[in-house]
Image (cartoon, grey):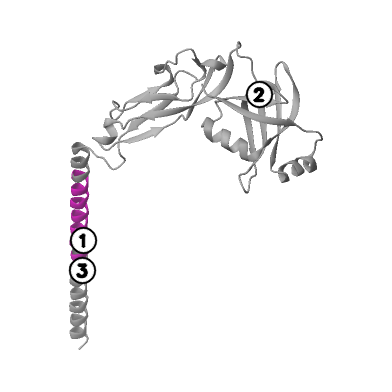
Amino acid sequence: MKEIVLAVASREGTGKGHARRVRMSGNIPAIIYGPQTKPISVQVSLREFQSAWKTAGGSSAIYNLDLGGKSKKVLIRELQRDPVTSEIVHVDFHAISMTKPIHLSVPIRLIGIPVGVKTDGGIMQTTMREFEIACLPADIPEHIDIDVESLHIGESIHVRDIKIEKAKILDEEQRTIVVISAPTVMKSTEEEAAEAAEDEAAAEEAEAAAGGTEAAEGAKKEEGTEDQDKKDKDKKDKGKKEK
């Protein structure tokens, strides 16, 4: 587990105005707190913090704060950022004891390309990006590696399948971490044949219906013609009688 040394300084004052002045001086307002630590308001150089954050590679690292010659081991519990610029505006440091277990989040890192993706054209769906774990500070892993190369379409990995040395995973065992799904455009031969048969049957029904309609219209037209012929004949006969 990485330990990052970071210098901080005490600060006096509270409120938005004070915090704004701290940031204008190139520092970040911060606080140190913990179960056995009275809250301490501090400030840290923005440049030094950004460098330490980059070196740590994430929030699961232990930071060894140097406060006036006294050392305090902490974790970063929260980073507050400006909603517009995304710049860090406040840091919460959580003081820890190296002899007591702590709860924290650790990132998951998937290793390899699943055979179901590489060979069968499947889609890898990741539903978890980190684990909630409990362990001693000295045993905090930087990340949890999970090998996914052997996964075929339809196969998945769950929390219950993962074991971490010297740490306990707190997430529910039945949760899915990653699953390989079939591509949405993939159809079986049977499905394609069934769809073709349905289309053919529908076409035949439509053709039959059209033929029946034409026959009915023809019969009706013929019947209308016969009726007209009869009317014309009756009219002609009536005319002869009148003469």
Q: Is residue 65 left or right of residue 184?
A: right
State the image coordinates of residue 227 (x, y, percent, origin top left): 21, 71
Indicate which label's residue lies in the foreground, 2 or 1. Answer: 2
Q: Nearer the viewer, residue 239 or 135?
A: 135
Q: Residue furthest right?
A: 13
Q: CA distance from mark 2 to mark 3?
A: 93 Å
Nearer mark to the viewer, of 2 and 3: 2
- Percent across and percent down for residue 160 are 42, 17
The CA span between labels 1 and 3 is 9 Å
- Decide: few, some or many residues near mark 1? Use Cα within 10 Å; few <14, some 14-19, many ≥20: few
Q: Say which residue label 1 marks.
A: 216
The type of residue carrying mark 3 is: Lys
Mark 3 surroundings within 10 Å by alpha-carbon count, few (fewer than 14), some (14 through 19), many (20 or more): few
Q: Position of residue 243 (x, y in %)?
A: 20, 89
**Residue at the spot of label 2:** 94
Which range of residues does the magenta coloring cover? 197-218
Q: Earlier in the sequence, mark 2 or mark 3?
A: 2
Asked whether the residues under the numbered discs 2 and 1 touch, taking CB atoms below 8 Å apart as contact, a structural biologist would say no
Q: Secondary structure at mark 3?
A: helix
- Could you say whether the residue bearing mark 1 is in a helix, strand or loop? helix
Which comes before the other along the chain, label 1 or label 3? 1
Q: What percent of the width, then of the height, locates residue 110?
A: 39, 29
C-alpha span from label 2 to label 1: 87 Å
Instruction: Decide: is 236 above or below 13.
Output: below
Is 227 situated left or right of 96 in this image? left
Q: Residue at x 42, y 26 (%)?
A: 177
| Residue at 18% from the left image edge and 44% from the top image edge | 197
- Find disc 3 in the rendering and name its residue: 221
Describe the element under mark 2 as helix, strand or loop: strand
Q: How many marks?
A: 3
Q: Residues within 10 Å of mark 2 (few under 14, many from 20)?
A: many
Which amino acid lies under the numbered mark 2 shown in the image of this protein? Answer: His
